[in-house]
Amino acid sequence: MAYDNNNIFAKILRGEAPAFNVYEDDHSLAFMDVMPQVPGHTLVIPKDPAADIHAADPVILGATVATVQKVADAVKAAFAAPGIMIAQLNGPAAGQTVFHLHFHILPRHEGLEFRMHARDMEDAEVLEAHAAKVRACLQP
Ligand code: AMP
């Protein structure tokens, strides 16, 4: 799939759209999903433009997955989650809605159901509070 420089995650990377950031390094950025399926739903993206996993440079993909592990550790601690689900969708048929490669990190608790994918916007104060919890659990 061709990469659209005006997708929302590209705008976040350029600072043209706001985000509740939790982590950033040379190759990746992590921020709260604004329509979380569970409290603490966090996204990790590479800074390189790639629409999906098929278009990603394997070295950058590896570095991005290392960030996923780091942020997932922090999300698990921040939300006292007994389980962590990692999801990554490629193509509209798989449910992808933003065409910049990203990984979903979802804290899971027994009996706590998912909300619908990319549907209900969370309040900014809640998202900022959740981002602060994750940041507090990240190693410097
Ligand atoms: P996917 O359907 O796998 O492409 O996931 C895209 C995700 O991005 C969904 O979970 C949306 O809720 C989320 N999302 C859309 N716009 C934003 C945004 N501006 N900031 C953070 N997350 C977003």
Image (spheres, helix red, strand yellow):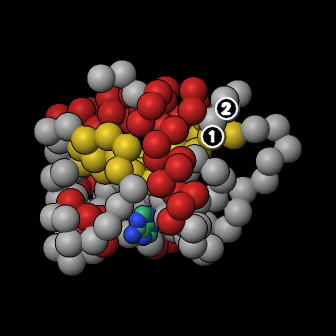
Q: Residue at x 64, y 51 (%)?
A: 39
User: Is ligand 1 less than 8 Å from the beta carbon at label 2?
Assistant: no
Secondary structure under tag 1 reads strand
Relative depth, front residue between 73 and 61? 73
Relative depth, front residue between 23 and 37? 23
Image quadrant in which you'd find residue 140: top left
Amino acid type at circle 2 is Ala
Q: Residue at x 45, y 31 (%)?
A: 136
Q: Which residue is mark 2?
A: 81
Residue 112 visible at all: yes
Q: Which residue is mark 1?
A: 107
56 horizontally vs 83: left or right: left
- Residue 31: percent from the left, percent from the top? 39, 51
| Quadrant of the rendering where the N terminus is positioned | bottom left
Residue 1 visible at all: no
Secondary structure under tag 2 reads loop
Relative depth, front residue between 103 and 8? 8
Relative depth, front residue between 31 and 61? 31
- Residue 19: percent from the left, percent from the top? 35, 61
Q: Residue at x 72, y 56 (%)?
A: 114
Q: Quadrant of ligand 1?
A: bottom left
Q: Residues within 10 Å of mark 1 (few under 14, many from 20)?
A: many
Amino acid type at circle 1 is Pro
Image quadrant in which you'd find residue 62: top left
